Amino acid sequence: MKTIYSFLFTLSISVVSIAQSSISLVNDNSIGLTPTNRKIPSKSSLKTSAAGLSGRFDPGYALITTNGVLPSEIAGGSAGTKVGLFVSPTYCDSTTRSSFATASYISNHKFGMNFDPKSIIFDQVNFTPLVTSTESYYLDTVWVGNFYQRRTSFNDTLLVEVVWGDTTNTNVFGTFSFAAPNGFFGTYFCPLFNAAPGVQGSASFLTAPPSNKLSIKYVLTDADTATTNLTGYIPVVVNGLMGQLIPADNIVSAVATFIPGQPNIPVGTVCYSSATSTNVATVNGMAARIMVQNTPSPPTAGSAYFDDLSVGKNYTTYSFKRERYNMPGSFGTKLRSSTNRAYMIDFSIHTPVVTNVKDLHTNSFGLTQNMPNPYTKESVVSYKLSSDVNSALFTVTDIMGRVVSSENAGTTTGTHSVKLGAYAAGIYYYSLNVDGNVTTKKMIVE
């Protein structure tokens, strides 16, 4: 059992030493947030049968609950509470304004959250990770916390970029650490991006290679205005019914921005407005939801921090105007990062299904049913090795027993995956031969 420390932050430290910016987190009590109903399931309460682990997880909320904050202490940014709820308008450019008490130009272009299921913060009972460093998992849905205001009939887009990799992958993540006296904040891992001065944010700009990245353009409708007013989240499905396979020991970062569908929006137009503002929004706009922890004092290095959060795991990511346009004084090609300013983005995941538990014990490996099945274009098979083996051969045969494909597979301890291609319609069998022990399953291609 790991020793759990209280991880205390101050908003002032976060803004000065992390953001180094004039960001204004504006409280808007009129939007009717009800976060007291939000709970993070313990691992023991999750679906962990032969169907594998599955669930929806909120890194932003988990950060706060691990710091000893009670649900009753989370309330709309009111004075005297430990946690404030805020909204932060976001846009692909800096020509529009948001309006609360007064109107100001928008500086926030991207908002996002890192997710590491190996972190112990999601299990508030036993403090065990959702998956181990040798287990892969599927990312099913990214739930983007926001408030979308639709004022015109133009169709806007929510651009969601998902990247993944281990924290040593410098093609995906950049790192930076804080020196004394703020060294207790640890090391931050943030997605790399390409800042192109003068180019609007409507195009994908996270620079991870195609093997580690998905770009999803979600077209917003009137229904999304109603949805976010009621629940505050838009569910963005990742890679269809199959989900995106995330290799073992990888963290995920989902970063979103609002792309207006209306061309030639006048400079200075108000695109997001609170209910109490005297400046009414005349074009469509969006604000991200943020939780901010307000605590009485900074932590003491080595004794008053939550050790699981100091190694670059579940952190907020965001970019401001000067990063977006590569202006002087920015962090360059890394998104900024913060721990107590947590964007409310959830992640739904599931782990591969182990359908033959007997094989896992007697043959030291377990083979899953391909997902999806039946399928048309692509499917995935996973298998788990309880120890290193000498050889693993994956073979697909047709109903007549003829070999369609054959390839060597992974032989190290942990979970491995094999992609199945677009075969002609029919019934097939796939087999895994591990050191002479063979398991075979049937699949259907439509």
Image (tube, helix red, strand yellow):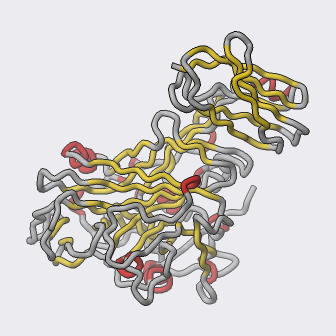
Res 93 → quadrant: bottom left
Question: Exactly how many numbered labels are in the figure?
Answer: 0
Q: Where 139 falls versus 147 (above or below)?
A: above
Q: Is residue 427 above or below residue 356?
A: above
Left or right: residue 202 versus residue 142 is: left
Q: Residue at the spot x=63%, y=74% of the render?
A: 187
- Left or right: residue 196 compared with residue 163: left
Percent of width and height locating residue 257: 35, 62
Examine the rendering and report whether any part of residue 252 can be seen: no
Q: Quadrant of the N terminus?
A: bottom right
Left or right, residue 358 beside residue 338: right
Relative to the observer, which residue lies in front, 270 or 308? 270
Work out whether 54 lies above or below 110: above
Q: Position of residue 194 (x, y in %)?
A: 46, 71
Quarter-of-image position of residue 352: top right
Question: Residue, x 10% and y 63% (percent of image)?
Answer: 282
Eyeballing the image, is 204 above or below 23?
A: above
Name the residue furthest top.
400
Left or right of residue 249, residue 96 in this image = left
Q: Is residue 329 visible?
A: yes
Query: Which residue is pictured at 48% across the width and 70% down the height?
Result: 193
Picture coordinates of residue 101, whole percent (x, y): 17, 75
> Where residue 328 sits in the image (x, y, percent)?
42, 89
- The residue drawn where x is 23% and y is 60% is 260
